[in-house]
Image (cartoon, helix red, strand yellow):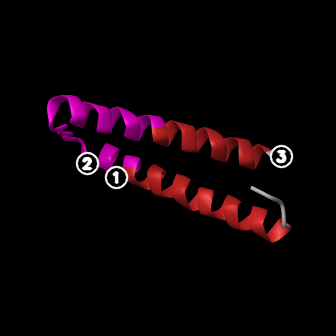
Amino acid sequence: MSIRVYFLALSALGMSAFLLLHFGLILIYGQFLIFESNLPVLILEIGLTAAIMIFGFYCVISELKKGRNI
């Protein structure tokens, strides 16, 4: 395994923990509201999340092209 695959696994674990926390809070409180008043920070968060998704797709496609079992 390369460093790219390890980074992909860590990104997937981080994003799944993030979603699990939010869904858990929705289950407990019935709603979970997030407000970001700083527009540059919001744009950066969206951009980094999109970059992680693109990197994940890149890793999956490259591993499939190599013919390895995922």
Q: Are marks 3 and 1 in contact (CB under 8 Å)?
A: no
Q: Are marks 2 and 1 in contact (CB under 8 Å)?
A: yes
Quadrant holding the C terminus: bottom right
- Amino acid type of the residue tagged 1 in the rendering: Ile
Per the image, the residue denoted by label 3 is 1
Tell me how far mark 2 sits from mark 3, CA to CA: 38 Å
Residue 20 place in picture, x, y as percent: 39, 36
Quick one: which residue is furthest to the bottom in this view?
65
> Magenta part of the protein: which range?
17-45
Mark nearer the N terminus (3 vs 1): 3
Mark 3 vs mark 1: in front: 3
User: How far apart in space, not on screen, are marks 2 and 1 (Cα)?
Assistant: 6 Å
Q: Earlier in the sequence, mark 2 or mark 3?
A: 3
Q: Amino acid at mark 2?
A: Leu
- The residue at which mark 1 appears reads as 43
Which residue position holds label 2? 39
Instruction: From the viewer's side, name the closer residue of 49 and 43.
Output: 49
- SS class, disc 1: helix
